[in-house]
Amino acid sequence: MNYHSNIGRHTAVVGLQWGDEGKGKIVDVLTAEHDVIVRYNGGANAGHTVVVEGQRYALHLIPSGILYPHKMCVIGNGVVVDPERLLEEIDSLRSRSIAVGDNLRISDRAHVVMPYHKEQDAALEDYLASTTANASGSLAIGTTRRGIGPAYADKVCRSTAIRMGDLLDPAYLRERLRVICKLRTNELRAMGVSTAPLDADALAERFGALGVRLRPHIVDSVYELHGAAALGRTILFEGANACLLDIDHGTYPYVTSSNCSTAGIHSGTGIPGSTIGRVLGIMKAYSTRVGAGPFPTELNNEIGSTIRERGREYGTTTGRPRRCGWLDLVAVKYSAMVCGATGIACTLFDVLSGFDELRICTKYRLADGSLSDRFIPDARRLEGASPVYETFDGWSESVAEAGSRSALPDAAKRYLARIEEVVGIPIEMVGIGPERSQTLVAQ
Ligand code: GDP
Ligand code: IMO
Ligand code: MG
């Protein structure tokens, strides 16, 4: 088998909102029917939660398929890897009797997040937060401060980047770091950070040692993946972050620094998009966002707080309270279009029980008074759009024990049916609780 015979065999899971849609849980469910699970973008800014029989696992860099023994998990070349965090994650899984060994492969071409990237990230955010550059306040993005933007910037810059494979060559690593550290010290100082000169030799030793520990996992992931596919294995791509945070297709500049839509799969793994037959777009039954940036359906009121408390909407990575609002289908439909979604998983549906009335945004009213059903992937222009809602009856019953979609209250069925009608693709899964088992799958 070569890549021609793999046309349409693989699956992608991608977030259709601003992240935290429950991708980890859905990847975990789908892992049962795939062989290889691959992260293609982002880094430790992601926080993917899987709950199995009351045990909660938060994954940041390791694919959410790791909980199944005998599945291969791959960190693709498009990911930016913080080796210290990765090792912490490996150790934490092992301490909970989850095997991490030959089942974890890391691309030798994935870029390394270095400590100075995190300092740069924080320094820029602090500087921006201290300015009031425009009418909507500061220009700070509200990043996770995990060094994501600076690490991707170095990747694009080329001459100041370090890749996972470089950690295995101590002399080369030291030589590169000597140049980079000089530059970085000056840059950090120019940003007002009173740092001692970055010590290239100490960093080279520290990261060389991390390389020694990670060496068994570091491979040419492109050949590994094609090799597995050639043996008939199916691949599940796990998107981190989400389409509306995509560097090209999101609410720029309030986005992350990678292609988190399906656009990132080919570049971030070397597997051509034509091999993906199923794209499952993940959306919450409402909307949330962490960090700054426009959010047309945001509810800065009692209803927003109720959603936050019922949905436990606090960041998996940073613990920050998530901003909450009504479901925005203009945004979801746009993401589904950009990602080529073939189906939807509607998660956190149980959180909507108990509201008298629910709203779904299906259009925007623009600054000139006209109506539009187009999303606006530009922060400044999106600020000028206000949501136009359709109102739905709520339901009081808990759905957490429902055995199938047909067993849901009528009002709940109408809400789901309207989503399918507006977005134009089927809902294949409905999440009715955080547990692996609390997932209704369309027959
Ligand atoms: P991800 O980043 O897309 O993987 O999502 P996160 O893990 O950051 O956030 C989703 C949160 O919702 C986690 O706490 C999950 O355990 C939880 N979750 C996922 N699906 C459901 C669901 O259907 N119902 C409820 N109540 N919680 C869910
Ligand atoms: P998962 O995979 C929610 C947001 C940050 C910030 C912006 C840029 O768990 O869904 P960054 O640190 O990437 O430079 O921050 O993007 N962000 C996320 N929000 N879930 C995520 O990942 C996110 N990854 C990045 O809050 O607004
Ligand atoms: Mg998350």
Image (cartoon, grey):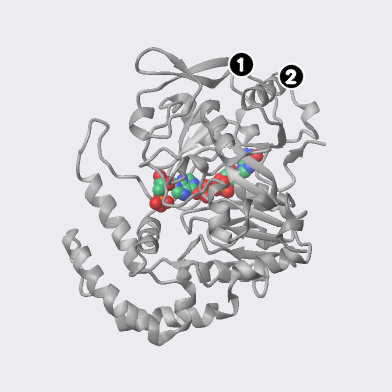
Image height of 218 relative to 157, above or below: below
Check whether the beta carbons of the residues at disc 2 and disc 1 lie within 8 A of each other: no
Q: Residues within 10 Å of mark 2 (few under 14, many from 20)?
A: few
Disc 2 from disc 1: Cα separation: 11 Å
Which quadrant is home to the N terminus? bottom right
Is residue 257 at least partly visible in the picture?
yes
Residue visible at 45% across and 84% down in the picture = 169
Q: Residue at x 71, y 60 (%)?
A: 3
In this view, the residue in front, 171 or 203, is: 171
Secondary-structure class at tag 2: helix
Decide which of 90, 42 is in the foreground and name it. Answer: 42
Classify 105 as above or below 11.
below
Percent position of residue 282, x then y: 61, 40
Residue 399 position, x and y percent, is: 71, 31
Amino acid type at mark 1: Phe
- Residue position marked by numbered label 1 in the rendering: 392
Foreground pick, 440 / 54: 440
In the picture, the disc for residue 368 is none
Residue 410: image tag: 2
Above-or-below relation of 385 to 4: above
* Secondary-structure class at tag 1: strand
With 192 as the anchor, is 339 left or right in this view?
right
